[in-house]
Amino acid sequence: MKTKLFSLILIFALTGSVVFAQGLAGSKTSFAILGGVNLQNLNGKDISGNKLENDMLTGFHAGVNVQLPVAPEFYFQPGLMFSTKGAKNIGVLNSTHKLSYVELPLNFVYKALVGNGYFMLGFGPYVAYGIGGKAIYEAGGVSVENDIEFKKEVESGDPHTTVYVKPFDAGANLFFGYELPAGLFLQLNTQLGLLDINPVDNRITGDNKSTLKNTGYGLSLGYRF
């Protein structure tokens, strides 16, 4: 799996290099800053294989991207983002899990002239790395907050009071929006995590059927110049 992911990233990196060379040949390259709100969830199964019943968590994202022409109306748009994700669960014990990622989206974008501006449709993969997180539990007016630890494998002696998540994530982006002639744009984002971020847990001796994936939506406001 790691080899396939590395190969995928390498392919897109090489593609970006070719496109950048085309941009130097005379096509216009542009840059953007953007940010907005996230509505994220953690989907998957618990240790018994039952579907997780989490609720969406509101977060945010902010970052930059560069838009490189590929062909008329088509662009390659890599970026660098900071994004918060996670989920909450409301019950006898309320729990909130917040995850922070540095994210590299590698999108291909189609832009068509509609009115005075441009309709945008983009899609592509993303890779992300976890840099922080919090697990918050509330019951009976008492709140407890612990750091989430990122690791690929949980050892048998690790504490059960700590939440563990794999640091590396990857998935697919899809978005559409509208860009004004002055450079201001608004877009609706959808994101589907394709990797199980639940680490191998050596504390569990029986059959562990748990899985965990990031999914969500977002609304971005940005300016291209």
Image (tube, grey):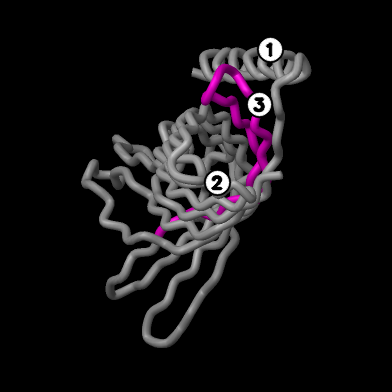
**From what the image shows, is residue 166 above or below residue 93?**
above
The range drawn in magenta is 63-87
The numbered mark, 1 or 2, whose residue comes first in the sequence reads 1
SS of the residue under disc 3: strand
Amino acid on which the number 1 mark rests in the picture: Val
Kind of residue at disc 2 = Gly
Nearer the N terminus, badge 1 or badge 3?
1
**110 falls in the magenta region:** no
Is 183 positioned to the left or the right of 26 in the image?
left
Foreground pick, 154 / 114: 114
Which one is in front in this view, the residue at disc 1 or the one at disc 3? 3
Tell me the kind of residue under disc 3. Leu
Q: Residue at x 54, y 58 (%)?
A: 36
Q: Which residue is mark 2?
A: 157
Which numbered disc flags the more N-terminal residue, 3 or 2? 3
Q: Examine the rendered structure and indicate whether residue 117 appears above or below residue 69.
A: below
Question: Where's residue 216, x and y in %?
Answer: 40, 49
Q: CA distance from mark 1 to mark 2?
A: 49 Å
> Which residue extends farthest front?
115
Q: What is the quadrant of residue 67 in the picture?
A: top right
Q: Which residue is mark 3?
A: 68
Q: Please, what secondary structure does the residue beneath circle 2 have?
A: loop
Q: Is residue 153 left or right of residue 28?
A: left
Q: Nearer the viewer, residue 202 or 83?
A: 83
- Mark in front: 3 vs 2: 3
Q: Is residue 136 above or below residue 30?
A: below
Q: Which residue is mark 1?
A: 18
Residue found 70% across the figure and 22% down from its top = 27
Residue at the bottom extreme of this rendering: 141
